Image: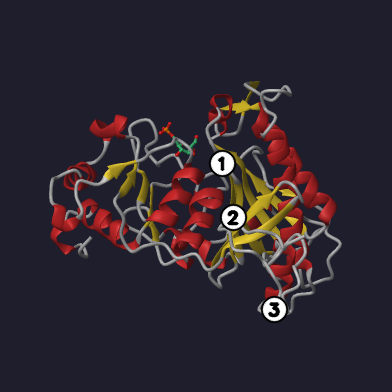
Amino acid sequence: MTGYTRPDGASSHAGDGSPEGELGTFKTLEQFIIERQDSFPHSTGAFSRLLRDISLAAKIVNRDMRRAGLIDVYGSTGETNVQGEVQQKMDALAHREFVQALRRGGECCLIGSEEHAEAIPLSSVSQEGDGQYIVLLDPLDGSSNIDVNVSVGTIFSIYRLPDGYDEEKPDPKAALQSGTEQVAAGYIVYGSSTMLVYTTGNGVNGFTLDPSIGEFLLSHPDLQTPDRGRIFSINSGYYHSFEGGLREYLDWLQQQDPETNRPAKTRYIGSFVSDFHRNLLKGGIYMYPATEGSPEGKLRLMYEANPMGFIAEEAGGAASDGHTRILEKSPEKLHQRTPLFIGSKEMVRRAEAFLQGEPERAMPA
Ligand code: P6P
C-alpha cells in the first residue's frame, strides 16, 4: 500500500521510500501542541490539555451539526439568551458540550459564554499557579444559519487566572481582562470542511478535521493574511443608518478604479466566523459598525472581537472599533458589544481614516 495520498496529490513516503502511515506527512493537533509546548514557559502540559478539551467539544458539535436535519436540533429552544436573542437548539447543545468538556478536563477555572448570563466557575485540578485558565466562548456563532445549511462557527479566547484568584471565592470579574492579555485564541469553522484555527501569540495555524480518523490535521501552517484584498463584508442593508464616514468608505470601495483594484467585491455570509476565515485567507475586511438597531455594534468584545482580533494581528492584519485597537479596549461587562472593523491591515487603516474624517490619510490600498 502506498503512503497516505495528500489532497494535493503528493504521496507521503518517508525518506527511505517506505510508505508512511495513514497520517502521512500530516501532523495532528496534539502532536503540534506538544511540539510547541516548550514555547510556553512554566507549562505543565495543562495548556495542551486545555486545547485538547476544546478540540474534543468541537468534534462533538461537528458530529451533531452534520446530522442537524436528522436529529432534533433545528430551530429554537423557545428561550431567549442573555442577549435577548432567540436561542437556537444548536446554541444550547454547543454550550453544553464545551462546558462539559472543559469541566471534565479540569484545566479551566472560569467560563464566560454567550449563552450564559454570568461567568461559570469550575473546580480545577491544576496545581496552584500553573495551568489555571479562563475560557470565553461564543459556542456557536451564526447558528440561525444552521436550518438553511450555511456554515457557522465557534470562537474561543483563553486567559490565565489573575494571581491570587481564590477558587473558593470565584470572582466573575476575573474574566474581564483586555484582549492584549489573551494567552490563546481560536475558532472552529463548520464549513465545507471543519477547521480549527488558533494562535498562542506565535503565529496562526489551521487544522482540518479528518472525520475518517477523528483528528484535526495541520493543513494551513503559519497563516498570514494579505495586507489588502478586494473583499468587503458588511450588511449593506443598513447603509442609510451608517455614520457618514463609513458611507463614504463604502462608496469609495465601489468606485471604478482598476489601479487601486476597485470596485471591491461584497461577500457577506451572515456568519462572522465564515466571513472572517475567507477574508483571512484571501484578504478583505469584515465590518459590523454601530447601527440604529445596534448602537454599540452587534459583535461582542470578549468572545468575538478580542479572539478574532488576536488572530487577525498574529496573521499580519488589524482589528479596530474604528478608532481604538480592539485588543486595547477596557472591558466592563462580559457581554459588552463593540463596533468591529477587522481583516487586512491596509483596509482597516483606510476604514479608520474615513471614519475619522481624514480619508486622504489612509495607506494605499
Ligand atoms: P446581521 C450572527 O448572528 C452574527 O453575530 C455574525 O455571525 C454575523 O456576521 C452577524 O451577526 C449578522 O448580523 O445584522 O447582518 O444579520
Who's the residue at 24% across and 41% down the image?
Answer: 243
* Helix, strand or loop status at disc 1: loop
Q: Quadrant of residue 78?
A: top right
Which residue is depicted at the point 21% across and 41% down?
A: 247
Callout 3, which amino acid?
A: Gly
Q: Are marks 1 and 3 in contact (CB under 8 Å)?
A: no
Left or right of 99, for residue 191: left
Q: How many marks?
A: 3
Tell which of 310 and 37 is nearer to you.
Answer: 37
Characterize the local packing of mark 3: few (<14), some (14-19) or many (20 or more) Cα atoms within 10 angstroms: few
Q: Residue at x 54, y 37 (%)?
A: 151
Helix, strand or loop under label 3: loop
Q: From the top left corner, tell me how far across and down residue 339 is, in percent.
A: 39, 46
Residue 67 is situated, as x and y percent measured from the top left of the image, at 70, 30
Q: Quadrant of the C terminus?
A: bottom left
Q: Which residue is mark 2?
A: 7
Dot in front, 1 or 3: 3
Alpha carbon separation for disc pair 1 and 3: 33 Å
Instruction: Determine which residue is flagged by label 1.
Output: 192
Q: Amino acid at mark 1?
A: Ser
The image's mark for residue 15 is 3
Ligand 1 within 8 Å of disc 2? The answer is no
